[in-house]
Image: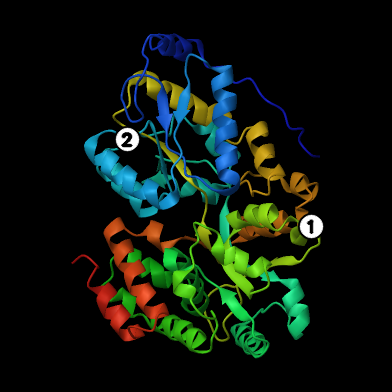
């Protein structure tokens, strides 16, 4: 049964309210300050920006003595800003991340606090695989705060009908579709090469489909020459074969994801497909509402690779985005922030808001709510991918330590631009493995 949307009064405990009232006279505190209201730096874009603004507004209205002041940043700007802020001790109370290697570093450096005892309620509401990504050594250091984000294949059904093709289920079918679209003068795939990180989606899925999740796990484990695994070199060769076959059309290296230019190419009919996260569905809804309503933006899973070892149900992407609480926050800020996390995040109002705006909440037992939504087909597919995945590999640029992730993006860009060979890529990346 669909949960009614409502604004919910979220009451703090008396102790937290009392502590927060001590700050009532503090004004003008800047984001990142250890005095004044708790602070947060969410990332802009799509359904999440709406969700987080709604959630903080709801919380602040119900808890005027324990507000959380939010300042929004664009994705790339945030990544630069937070590194500097944490180093200088001017970070916000709630630290946004994608977990993975960045969270590991925060924990190792003592930048964030153990939330295990403070967030049992919210952790209990979400899918275990999503909660697990916020844990280090069995303790909770980050709480999911947004939709689960599997990478999916979006396609323009009108263009597929035009060339007589079907959504590819195998790599061979994908290459056949490439030939058909090129013959019709349509770019088979859109990819935001200027942003670089969309390139990751291709290597992540191909490596998993060819060799299984164990291949990248060897990289994470720091195994010597792990980047030389045959599954990786084969995946890179497949990518370059796709590029040479005209799989991405012309000028893909200058397309920006921040401007949603990759999506625009699909809904304006200039590209047939795009491999992107579930988060872009809300952008399609906003920018191509008529096409979405008419079922002309299809979604499906990444194709299988013939002879591959990976389970076709495996997925890649981001289990969620996450909030951690800064270790340098004041006791009052910690109290307000942790109460917000445990009470407000993924409560009924939060979950319903996300659903009604095309998001995929990683909340257990919401199948009936999904089925009641206008976007039920998309939501059910995306949610089922997450719920049933034997392996949900975190995006590699988040799973790896920041320095290694930057090297990966640089070398992968060179692969897509045909500037280096798969073997050179492996040599370059093996050099980033410690020891």
The answer to which of 271 and 47 lies nearer the viewer is 271
- Position of 93 relative to 36 (above/below): below
Quadrant the N terminus occupies: top right
Q: Which is closer to the viewer, label 1 or label 2?
A: 1
Q: Nearer the viewer, residue 116 or 151?
A: 151
Q: Is residue 236 above or below residue 321?
A: below
Residue at the image point whose x is 25% and y is 34% from the top: 89
Image quadrant in which you'd find residue 405 = bottom left
Q: Residues within 10 Å of mark 2 (few under 14, many from 20)?
A: many
Mark 1 / mark 2, whichever is N-terminal: 2
Percent coordinates x, y for residue 326 in the rendering: 34, 33
Instruction: Assign a secondary structure to mark 1.
Output: helix
Residue 365 visible in the snapshot: no
- The residue singled out by tag 1 in the image is 293
What is the residue that sits farthest to the left in this orientation? 435
Quarter of the image holding residue 16? top left
Question: Tag on residue 91?
Answer: 2
**Is residue 18 shown left or right of residue 375?**
left
- Where residue 158 sits in the image (x, y, percent)? 76, 74
Residue 215 x %, y %: 41, 73
Give 211 or 67, whichever is nearer the viewer: 67
Of 254 and 380, nearer the camera is 254
Against 414, is 383 above or below?
above
> From this viewpoint, is residue 273 visible?
yes
Position of residue 176 relative to residue 228, above or below, is: below
- Quadrant of image for the C terminus: bottom left
Q: Residue at x 32, y 35 (%)?
A: 91
Residue ID at (45%, 22%): 336
Q: Residue 59: x, y in percent? A: 56, 24
Alpha-carbon span between mark 1 and mark 2: 42 Å
Q: Quadrant of residue 53?
A: top right
> Which residue sits at x=58%, y=48%?
46
């Amino acid at each position: 049964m669909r949960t009614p949307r409502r604004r919910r009064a979220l009451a703090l405990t008396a102790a937290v309210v009392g502590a927060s009232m001590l700050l009532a006279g503090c004004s003008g505190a800047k984001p990142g300050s250890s005095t004044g209201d708790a602070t947060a730096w969410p990332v802009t874009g799509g359904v999440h920006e709406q969700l987080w603004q709604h959630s903080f507004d709801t919380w602040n209205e119900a808890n005027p003595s324990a507000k959380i002041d939010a300042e929004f940043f664009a994705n790339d700007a945030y990544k630069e800003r937070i590194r500097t802020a944490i180093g200088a001790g001017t970070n916000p109370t709630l630290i946004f991340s994608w977990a993975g290697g960045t969270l590991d570093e925060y924990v190792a450096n003592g930048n964030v606090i153990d939330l295990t005892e403070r967030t049992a309620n919210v952790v209990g509401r979400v899918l275990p695989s999503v909660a697990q990504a916020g844990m280090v050594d069995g303790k909770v250091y980050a709480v999911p705060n947004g939709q689960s984000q599997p990478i999916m294949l979006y396609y323009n059904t009108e263009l597929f009908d035009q060339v007589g093709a079907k959504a590819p289920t195998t790599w061979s079918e994908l290459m056949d579709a490439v030939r058909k679209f090129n013959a019709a003068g349509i770019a088979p795939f859109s990819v935001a090469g200027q942003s670089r990180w969309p390139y990751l989606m291709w290597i992540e899925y191909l490596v998993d489909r060819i060799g299984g999740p164990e291949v990248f796990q060897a990289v994470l484990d720091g195994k010597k020459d792990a980047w030389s695994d045959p599954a990786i070199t084969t995946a890179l060769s497949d990518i370059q074969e796709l590029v040479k076959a005209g799989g991405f059309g012309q000028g893909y290296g200058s397309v920006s994801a921040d401007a949603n230019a990759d999506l625009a190419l699909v809904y304006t009919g200039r590209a047939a497909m795009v491999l992107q996260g579930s988060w872009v569905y809300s952008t399609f809804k906003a920018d191509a509402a008529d096409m979405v309503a008419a079922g002309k933006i299809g979604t499906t899973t990444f194709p299988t690779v013939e002879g591959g070892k990976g389970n076709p149900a495996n997925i890649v992407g981001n289990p969620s985005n996450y909030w951690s609480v800064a270790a340098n926050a004041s006791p009052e800020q910690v109290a307000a922030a942790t109460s917000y996390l445990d009470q407000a995040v993924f409560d009924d109002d939060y979950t319903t808001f996300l659903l009604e705006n095309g998001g995929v909440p990683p909340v257990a037992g919401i199948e009936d709510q999904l089925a009641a939504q206008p976007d039920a087909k998309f939501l059910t597919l995306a949610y089922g991918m997450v719920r049933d995945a034997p392996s949900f590999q975190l995006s590699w640029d988040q799973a790896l330590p920041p320095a290694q992730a930057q090297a990966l993006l640089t070398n992968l860009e060179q692969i897509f631009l045909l500037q280096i060979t798969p073997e050179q890529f492996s040599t370059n990346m093996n050099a980033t493995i410690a020891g």
